[in-house]
Amino acid sequence: MLDKQRRSVFLDAKYPKRVAKEVSFYVDELAKSAEFGLTLERRVLTWLQNIDDDLRERLGRAGLVSADKNVSIGELVELYMEAESPSMKRETISGKRVRFRQSERRLDFTQRASRLDVVDVVRFKARLDADFSEATRAGILKAMARVYSWGESLGYVSGNPFSGSERFVFQ
């Protein structure tokens, strides 16, 4: 029960009975954690990291997890550029590519995009402080904030850790 409502995850025939039983166990664990505000056990977190997008989406619809798509920061940047490039001028595209290369040298682009949090952004900003002027730093943060905003609107991530990052620029 979560919010006085039983949560169900419907699995179709593509999931064998053994897998359905395993999913049932973890659904119960997720529901208990959400209902009582408990921290998830390591084995539940490990299981969540390894589930496929279909199952994550089903758990998300049941309100048990964020339905984030499992993409890295680098993949999110590439998806953004692929989708948005047709509407950009050539100079804008090359400028964004430069900012993303500068970001990649200071931020682990292999990390799952949904795992990036505000603390990571503050550390990233500190690395930028050491290497760039305020204007360049602001441009990089703005470009990354735009990627996360775009990703959030399409369900790639559930939040934008860069939102409000402008307040870090001049501190």
Image (spheres, grey):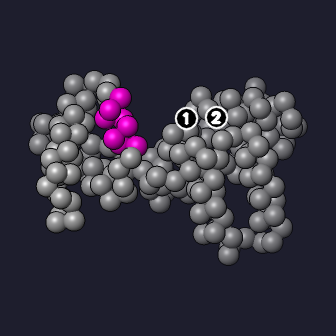
Q: Is residue 76 magenta?
A: no
Q: Are marks 2 and 1 in contact (CB under 8 Å)?
A: yes
Picture residue at 78% right of the left edge, 72% below the top: 89
| Real-space Cα separation, disc 2 to disc 1, in angstroms | 6 Å
Percent position of residue 11, x then y: 18, 59
Q: From what the image shows, is residue 76 above or below residue 139? A: below
Given residues 12 and 102, the one toward you in this image is: 12
The secondary structure making up most of the magenta span is: helix
Picture residue at 81% right of the left edge, 59% below the top: 95
Picture residue at 25% right of the left edge, 29% below the top: 33
Given residues 72 and 3, the one toward you in this image is: 72
Picture residue at 64% right of the left edge, 56% below the top: 77
Q: Is residue 44 magenta?
A: yes
Percent position of residue 138, x then y: 77, 42
At numbered mark 1, what does the secondary structure look like: helix, strand or loop?
loop
Q: From what the image shows, is residue 122 above or below residue 115? A: above
- Horizontal arrangement in the rendering, residue 154 relative to residue 51 (left or right): right
Q: Is residue 149 visible?
A: no
Q: Which residue matches tag 2?
A: 121
Q: Quadrant of the C terminus?
A: top right
Given residues 55 and 88, the one toward you in this image is: 55
Magenta segment boundaries in residue numbering: 42-49
- The circle on residue 109 is none
Q: Is residue 37 visible?
A: yes
Instruction: Name the amino acid type tagged 1.
Output: Asp
Percent position of residue 154, x then y: 47, 60
Q: Which residue matches tag 1?
A: 117
